[in-house]
Amino acid sequence: MGQPKRKQSKMRSRLRRGAHNFKMPLLAKDTDGNLVMPHRVNPETGMYRDRQVLEVEL
């Protein structure tokens, strides 16, 4: 296996690690005001794009 010719600098290592930071998932407001992930059925209400697609027992 090949070996590095030079020591990798601290700045270069930190720049690489900085690209792996956590990003908040995008959330959209549902018709009842709850935050849900887009393009997914709301598990609490069973609604998707203002239509009832799942039967939810209350």
Image (cartoon, helix red, strand yellow):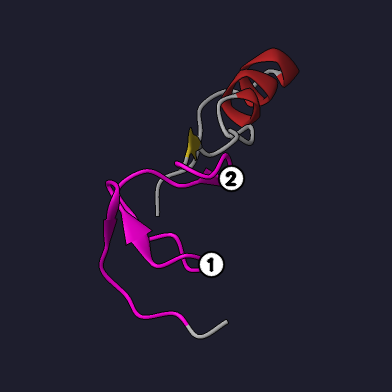
Query: Where's residue 48, x and y in %?
Result: 30, 55
Residue under the point 47% across and 68% down: 43
Residue under the point 62% across and 18% down: 15
Q: Is residue 23 above or below residue 45?
A: above
Disc 1 residue type (three-letter): Glu
Residue under the point 56% across and 26% down: 19
Give the main secondary structure of the magenta stretch.
Answer: loop
Reading the image, the residue beneath label 1 is 44
Q: Does the magenta stretch include residue 17?
A: no
Seen from the viewer's position, the closer of residues 5 and 15 is: 15
Query: Where's residue 17, x and y in %?
Result: 64, 31
Q: Is residue 42 above or below residue 43?
A: above
Magenta part of the chain: 31-56
Would you identify the image quadrant in which residue 55 lies?
A: bottom left
Quarter occupied by the N terminus: bottom left
Is residue 7 visible to the viewer in this orientation of the structure?
Answer: no
What label sits on residue 33 in the rendered view? Answer: none
Query: Which tag, 1 or 2, sits closer to the chain's start?
Result: 2
Seen from the viewer's position, the closer of residues 57 and 16 is: 57
Query: Where's residue 44, x and y in %?
Result: 53, 67
Q: How crowded is mark 2: few (under 14 residues within 10 Å), some or many (20 or more)?
A: few
Seen from the viewer's position, the closer of residues 56 and 37 is: 56
Reading the image, the residue beneath label 2 is 34
Q: Residue furthest right?
A: 10
Dot 1 falls on a residue whose secondary structure is loop
